[in-house]
Amino acid sequence: MENSEMSTIARRGIHYMQRLNSANVSSALLENGQNRVIDASLTLIRERAKLKGELVRALGGAVATSSLLGVPLGHNSSFLQGPAFAPPRIREAIWCGSTNSTTEEGKDLQDARVLTDVGDVPIQEIRDCGVDDHRLMNVIGESVKLVMEEDPLRPLVLGGDHSISFPVIRAVSEKLGGPVDVLHLDAHPDNYDEFEGNYYSHASSFARVMEGNYVRRLLQVGIRSITTEGRAQAKKVWR
């Protein structure tokens, strides 16, 4: 599915939601509109992943190919909202030409067998039609799984605030069939049970991860600040 086609479908879904809201119609019809936008969003990721997978195979294949998946989400940040703008900026830095694209092992990032890009999860369109964070986290996780299903692609997820760690890790764990090992580089443990009343806060992502038993071993490196509440939560969840 082309970007323009996806945009058309998403816009229709959003306009449909707006009409339903203005008409004060039932919650069932509202949910139907949201489902249409979600389905279009997942179809977009599925088709992009399929295209990139076919491209890699056409070039001779690979054991594994890193595939960029952007998640431009920033509303769960408790302070600045800038993380939502990060995925395109990271891509710009990768492809701007200011550095050599060849790694120390001779792999060229310009080679689709080394690095591909399946675009962004359309977070804003999904939120525009009133989808709550619980369903939004499911969409992010399903998007990660769709990329993993298209062998040999391996998702390299670009955030986005830290709240996306939860759906991404959960998706990988569920897809692989068990808890995974995680190396977490951060200044904070992100283990509040809730932060400022937000269950999916960027400061709570690893509380959600550990509650669900999606991680076998968690190594957090760089922690420079942890509150009394954070220490208590760590003892409760990270036994």
Image (cartoon, rainbow, N blue to C red):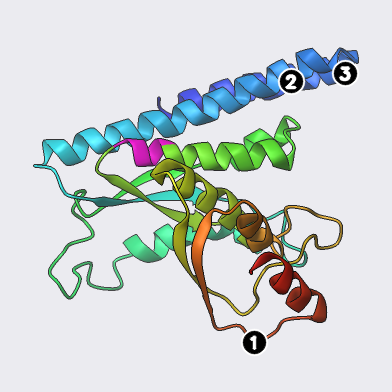
Q: From the viewer's perspective, is the residue at label 2 or at label 3 nearer?
A: 2
Residue 152 in the image: state x and y as whole percent.
24, 43
Density class for disc 1 (Cα within 10 Å; few <14, some 14-19, many ≥20) is few
Q: Position of residue 144 (x, y in %)?
A: 46, 43
Tell me whether circle 1 and circle 3 mark residues in contact (CB < 8 Å): no
Residue at position x 81%, y 63% in the image: 195
Local SS, label 3: helix
In this rendering, position of residue 102 left or right of residue 75: left
* N-terminal label among 2 and 3: 3
Furthest residue in direction left, as rendered: 60
- Residue stretch in magenta: 146-150
Residue at (45, 57) in percent of width and height: 180
Under mark 2, the amino acid is: Glu
Going by the numbered disc 3, the residue's amino acid type is Ser
Type of amino acid at the residue the image marks with label 1: Arg
Residue extending furthest bottom?
A: 224
In terms of depth relative to the viewer, which is nearer, 96 or 72? 72
Task: Give the x, y percent position of residue 235.
Answer: 71, 73
Q: Which of 76 and 181 is in front in this view?
A: 181
Residue that label 1 marks:
224
Residue 31 circle label: 2
Q: Name the residue under label 3.
A: 22
Give the image location of residue 134, x and y in percent.
Answer: 71, 40
| Magenta stretch contains residue 85 | no
Query: Would you identify the image quadrant in which residue 139 lies?
Result: top right
Real-space Cα separation, disc 1 to disc 2, in angstroms? 43 Å
Q: Is residue 105 left or right of 7 when viewed as pictured?
A: left
Residue at the limit of the structure toward the right, as seen here: 24
Residue at image location 77% in from the left, 19% down from the top:
30
Q: In this view, does 26 lie above or below 199?
A: above
Question: Residues under labels 1 and 3: Cα distance?
Answer: 49 Å
Circle 3 residues within 10 Å: few <14, some 14–19, many ≥20: few
